[in-house]
Amino acid sequence: MADTSYLSWPFFEAHHRQLAQRLRAAGDTIADDAKGSDEYTIASKLVRKLAEHGLLSAAVPTLENTAAAGLDVRSICLSREHLAYHSAMADFVFAMQGLGSGPISLFGTPAQQQEYLPRVANGESIAAFAISEAEAGSDVASIACSAEKRGGDYILNGSKHWISNAGIAGFYVVFARTGEAAGAKGLSAFIVDAHSKGLATERIDILSPHPLGRLVFENCKVPARNLLGNPGEGFKIAMATLDVFRSSVGAAALGFARRALDEACQHAKARKLFGQNLADFQITRERIADMALEVDASALLVYRAAWVKDSGAERVTKEAAMAKLYATEHAQLIIDRAMQMLGGAGLVAESVLERLYRDIRPLRIYEGASEVQKLIIAGQILGK
Ligand SMILES: Cc1cc2nc3c(=O)[nH]c(=O)nc-3n(C[C@H](O)[C@H](O)[C@H](O)COP(=O)(O)OP(=O)(O)OC[C@H]3O[C@@H](n4cnc5c(N)ncnc54)[C@H](O)[C@@H]3O)c2cc1C
């Protein structure tokens, strides 16, 4: 990463700078580990590799590492930014180990934490977070998948759509309707082991490599001890988890944007045309200035949200929404400008820019589309 000067910003402490150094040192090896054609195999391999590098502990607090301190959002964001710079798949794997186990880190009983978190942190088990449905994406409160209490179990019926790690996860945190009240207040969260009878998965392929699919529950029995929090707290658990991880989507976008800017600068300095370097033209300079400005603005918003959360704020809904919205939308623009500067070379299949162009797109949709982030920000400012 060409510009690391932002690490001297007062948002960071010494352990963040050390983490950034470790991430930089591991970057090229991780990029090599991420090579291959099947995203399911690569993701499974990368989980173990990230664990070997000791990089999953920032996403998953365990008794051995930071349970007492809890989740440190600046460490999560720094990890995602650096991993995304080198490999979208490495970023994805890290993010999902965190998001998928986040409800357990934040709301699990000591027994649930002990059973699941160490295996997620050491790469033995892959985590997944299942809230979206075909008819309930942005509108989470309309979830239809049901969980009915029968004796010492809950029986799940229905389906989940667009679930990252479907098919390779060891367990899914599933949000289902238990019916304590209408809408959002009638949802609960469950840890569902992947081998549970009555659970099937189907694969969905999208424009950038991403293990993704559908979960189908048919009378799937889940022990009541796998309930997270209390019945009816599912929405609260989901929103609190997203509050921690949402700014990190902006951090991943920032990593993609920094990579695009570095690629563009390198190319502009080397490419000769009309008797001079591409970098000497004023149009190029204006473009580079705009990109650098937007990268810094994204970084400020991302690390402000992370720092506010780490400083003890219970919720950072507005700050996290601003960080995600700005960083993802501008990363898309930055990558597009970089691609334009590379000319035909930017379009070559599997080149860095071509991959970034595809990899950034889902970030403007998942964990709340940009339009939803705008509604959240306006809601926070105007009052609900
Ligand atoms: C790569 C990828 C990975 C994902 N991983 C997961 C996962 O692991 N777990 C999980 O539970 N879900 C996951 N999702 C689902 C994701 O969170 C949803 O796709 C997202 O919330 C949008 O829901 P939707 O696709 O149903 O779109 P819809 O809700 O139908 O929205 C479609 C579009 O409508 C617009 N829109 C929405 N609301 C408004 C509004 N109020 N006003 C104006 N316009 C609006 C937005 O442009 C939005 O993109 C993933 C999605 C993708 C693409």
Image (cartoon, rainbow, N blue to C red):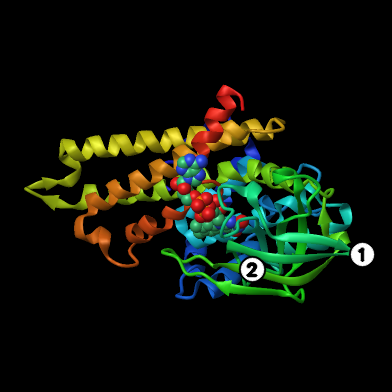
Q: What residue is shown at x 69% (from left), y 60% (from top)?
A: 145
What residue occupies the far left of the structure in this picture? 274
Mark 1 / mark 2, whichever is N-terminal? 1
Q: What residue is shown at x 47% (from left), y 68% (from top)?
A: 32
Q: Position of residue 95 (x, y in %)?
A: 60, 55
On whether ligand 1 comes within 8 Å of the CB at mark 2, the answer is no
Amino acid type, residue under disc 1 in the picture: Gly
Amino acid type, residue under disc 2 in the picture: Leu
Q: Picture quarter containing residue 315?
A: top right
Q: Position of residue 169 (x, y in %)?
A: 66, 68
**Looking at the rendered structure, which numbered label has been put on residue 152?**
1
Along the line of sight, which residue is nearer the eye, 327 or 283? 327
In 3D space, how far apart are the residues under numbered discs 1 and 2 (Cα atoms)?
A: 23 Å
Answer few, some or many: residues within 10 Å of disc 2's Cα (few below 14, many 20 plus, some between 14 and 19): many
Q: Is residue 295 visible?
A: yes
On whether ligand 1 comes within 8 Å of the CB at mark 1, the answer is no
Left or right: residue 112 versus residue 141 is right
Q: Is residue 12 visible?
A: no
Q: Position of residue 170 (x, y in %)?
A: 71, 69
Q: What residue is shown at x 29% (from left), y 34% (from top)?
A: 289
Left or right: residue 231 versus residue 272 is right
Q: Picture quarter containing residue 146?
A: bottom right
Check the image and report above or below for 166 versus 91: below
Are the residues flagged by discs 1 and 2 in contact, CB closer than 8 Å?
A: no
Q: Position of residue 287 (x, y in %)?
A: 25, 38
**Looking at the rendered structure, which numbered label has been put on residue 215?**
2
Answer few, some or many: residues within 10 Å of disc 1's Cα (few below 14, many 20 plus, some between 14 and 19): few
The quarter in which the C terminus is drawn is top right
